[in-house]
Amino acid sequence: MKRRIAGVVIVCMMCLAFAGCGGGTKVITGSSAAAGSQGSSAAAASGEYVFKAKDVDIHINAEAKEIIDKLGKPLSTYESPSCAFGDLDVYYTYAGFEVNTFQEKKVDYVKEVILKDDSVSTPEGLSIGDDADKVTKAYGEPTEKTDTKLEYDKEKMKLIFVLKSGQVDEIQYVTVRKK
């Protein structure tokens, strides 16, 4: 009986260890208090989309330390061994959005920014709850389009609008960096 229990415990621990390799985003809930997010679309013209919060420009693939320091204390953090990029992924939850980082050669970089509620918006003014037509009016025709996603690709990143019933349910600024 003890062997069986030990076996089950080992299998459960292995499942948990490999859960970080699944490629899915870990959702960490937080407060929906407002955080500023108005910015310039100049970055979009320069080859990337940039999210702005609390007067901080958050660039995908940028070194994370200064950005995280300027954003201030997060509502929560979560660390996980990285399966895709390097040593460690860290998830920082702020009011209305998440900043997720990866580590490479002991330096943390911004891997993705995920907008979770309508208290924040893109510099172009789009937020959770907007309809898909408003997205295409602001950004043009997407690189990839399905019933559940509008995707805009830049050199080393993607801007993804996750749709539910034709409305924006989540906005993701994501790296396309390869290991």
Image: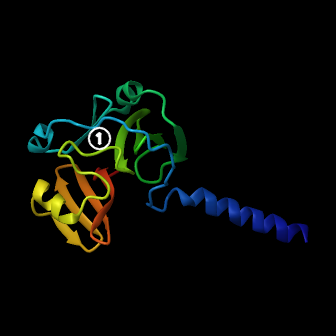
| Quarter residue 16 falls in | bottom right
The image shows residue 1, relative to residue 128, as above or below, that is below
Image x and y of residue 132, in percent:
21, 65
Could you tell me which quadrant the N terminus lies in?
bottom right
Query: In this rendering, would 133 be left or right of 37?
Result: left
Residue 135 vs residue 68, the one in the foreground: 135
The image shows residue 138, relative to residue 54, as above or below, that is below
Image x and y of residue 17, in percent:
60, 56
Image x and y of residue 58, in percent:
29, 36
Residue 37 vs residue 42, the one in the foreground: 37
Q: How many marks?
A: 1
Residue at image point 23% right, 63% down: 131
Residue at image point 41% right, 25% down: 69
Name the colouring of the figure: rainbow
The image shows residue 117, relative to residue 99, as above or below, that is below
Residue with the mark numbered 1: 61
Q: Amino acid at mark 1?
A: Asn
Query: In this rendering, would 13 be left or right of 44?
Result: right
Q: Residues within 10 Å of mark 1 (few under 14, many from 20)?
A: some
